[in-house]
Image (tube, rainbow, N blue to C red):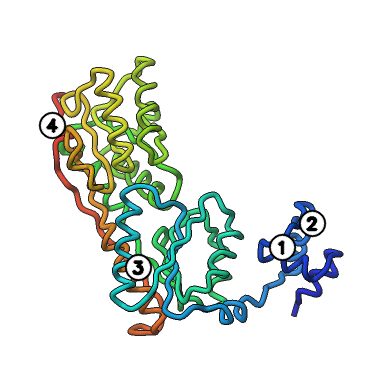
Amino acid sequence: MVTIKDVARESHVAISTVSNVLNNVGNVSEETTKRVLETVERLKYVPNVNAKYLKTSKKNTVGLFLSSVQGDFYRQLVQAVHLQCKMNGYVLNIYVSNENTSEEIYSMILSSGVEGAIIMNDGFGDNYIERLERINMPIVFIDREYCSEKVSSVVIDNASGAEQAVEYLIKMGHKRIGYVHGVPNFDEKARFEAYKRTLARYNFPVEEKFILNGYFEEAIAYSEMYLLLVRGGELPDAFFCANDEMAWGCIRAMKQMGIQVPEQVSVIGFDDTILAQYYRPGLTTIHSPVVELGSKSATEVIRLIRREGLDEGMSIRLKPELVLRDSCRLSGN
């Protein structure tokens, strides 16, 4: 069995240096860090993280690990997780990783010492899941489908929601339907693939000139739509936007350029944020069960901690629903 001493000897560094590299602490040069990590990979060294986790574990504490807390989606999610934890006698700690690497996120989870973790971070590599499984920490993912002895997932059925959105636009008589991308994460990929599949099922093309990138942000979507219009770009019958913020950004740009929504172009969003009903026009969108997502993920991680019910994790998929408002109308074509 390979030990940390073997890694240190092969890397020509002290054992403490290897420990600092693996735990992302101390002032270790980039060159040394690279050499140590390459040795770890070559020797297939597996740190004894189980003992470390058990030593630092905090009872009745759940960790919520996110890449962001900005926006209505995260506000609802955090509140739902917090309430469910509180009702079950658990303290909730929130960790935001921003631009951290998978190794840094892994170290953050490990050093937190929480009894169970809920993770929504598309930057967390799948290969690190196996490392978490080795320490038997109860985990619930809410940004990917994964199931094992101590790991569950609770996800929104993004494909179903996207299909509902595109089919609704088609039934409204729209044949040329554009799409506005978010960031390339689990939700976005599922929504875009379902968008393409649904158009193909009705023999409608995906027209690249109507595909924009909004990165889930209103301001970026606004800029992309504004540039399209300023350049005299042709518009489709409708746009399906991967979230509500981008949908509103697109609508604002079109209104500024004299394009009427929904009279000239229909727009549909995804998530059904609180503000969606107050937009003018009110936003037709897909309601994501965000509160249920937070509540069920907390309930599930507590079940895994307490070892209640089934002896292993499970995969739970929540179905979104179409919400009709005023940003779509029948095509005049």
Amino acid, disc 4: Leu
Task: Tell me the tag on residue 32.
Answer: 2
Q: Earlier in the sequence, mark 4 or mark 3?
A: 3
- The picture quadrant where one finds residue 210 is top left
Q: Residues within 10 Å of mark 4 (few under 14, many from 20)?
A: some
Does dot 3 land on a helix, a strand or a loop? helix
Task: Tell me the tag on residue 297.
Answer: 3
Q: Mark 1 and mark 3: span between their CA atoms?
A: 32 Å
Does dot 1 land on a helix, a strand or a loop? helix
Residue depicted at x 56% and y 70%: 110
Instruction: Name the residue beneath numbered marker 1.
Output: 21
* CB contact under 8 Å: marks 4 and 3: no
Q: Earlier in the sequence, mark 1 or mark 3?
A: 1
State whether residue 311 is above or below residue 214: below
Does dot 4 land on a helix, a strand or a loop? loop
Q: Mark 4 and mark 3: span between their CA atoms?
A: 39 Å
State whether residue 79 is above or below residue 221: below
Amino acid, disc 3: Ser
Q: Position of residue 168 (x, y in %)?
A: 19, 42
Q: Mark 4 and mark 2: span between their CA atoms?
A: 63 Å
* CB contact under 8 Å: marks 1 and 2: yes
Q: Position of residue 189 (x, y in %)?
A: 41, 48
Nearer mark to the viewer, of 4 and 1: 1
* CB contact under 8 Å: marks 4 and 1: no
